[in-house]
Amino acid sequence: MNSQLLPAIPAPLDRQFQPAVLFNRNYVGAAKKSGRAVPLVIGLERERGLASRHETFVLPNADAATLQYVERTAKFLLWARGGWKLFIGGPKVIGEFTRKTCAPTGARKSDCDLMDTACGIFDSQIAGGRCYGLATLGRRPANAAFFESHATDKTNRLIFGTDLTPLVQDEALDITEFGCGFIDQLKHDVRTKINKRLG
């Protein structure tokens, strides 16, 4: 393993862990520095024609590092954004590699099956008059608008998440109690604010 791709602070559970961002940054940087880098666009199509695109640079040949970069990037985008159709705009050899890898009989068969199932659920929801995909996209600007009710918006999209680090650092923590703790905090906050309003 290239020691230059290891993080400055090793992961406590796996000191040889190599974050994808370091490999990606190193690969793209080397490709551009070589003077041979060419554009690569990875497109994803979801339900109701929703689509997204990811633009990057690759070397034109199908060397091991290039194929690894393309395959892992496509996999990440499928999991992060979802989609049932993958488009590749770039060197033909990379497009052929991706077509074979992401085919129902390819190395990424499990990902194909999962996305098929996920998009199948969306299809049934749409047929029933619902589209959770569009609802989710609409929720993000709403979160941003209501996050600071008395201040100017600092962003136009906002996603809320939960920091699960304590569960990783302490195996003795109960997952259920950990999750319910946030509900208790919310309950306390709501009660405090209502009581304050009522005097």
Image (tube, rainbow, N blue to C red):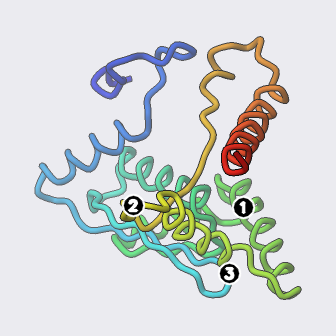
> Are discs 1 and 3 less than 8 Å apart at CB?
no
Three-letter residue code for mark 3:
Glu
Q: Indicate which label's residue lies in the foreground, 2 or 3.
A: 2
Q: Indicate which label's residue lies in the foreground, 2 or 1.
A: 2
Classed neighbour count for the residue bearing mark 1: other residues with Cα under 10 Å, few (<14), some (14–19), many (≥20): few
Q: Earlier in the sequence, mark 1 or mark 3?
A: 3
The answer to which quarter of the image holds residue 126 is bottom right
Q: Which mark is residue 105?
A: 1
Up/down of 4 relative to 53, above or below: above
Q: Residue at x 72, y 35 (%)?
A: 182
Up/down of 98 relative to 126, above or below: above
Q: Position of residue 70 (x, y in %)?
A: 43, 56
Q: Earlier in the sequence, mark 2 or mark 3?
A: 3
Q: Indicate which label's residue lies in the foreground, 1 or 3.
A: 3
Instruction: Specify the quadrant that holds the N terminus.
Output: top left
Up/down of 30 relative to 147, above or below: above
State left or right for residue 4 relative to residue 43.
Answer: left
Please tell me which residue lies in front, 151 or 97.
151
Element type where label 2 sits in the image: loop
Q: Which mark is residue 151?
A: 2
Please tell me which residue lies in front, 13 or 183.
183
Q: Which mark is residue 47?
A: 3
Q: Position of residue 194 (x, y in %)?
A: 72, 48
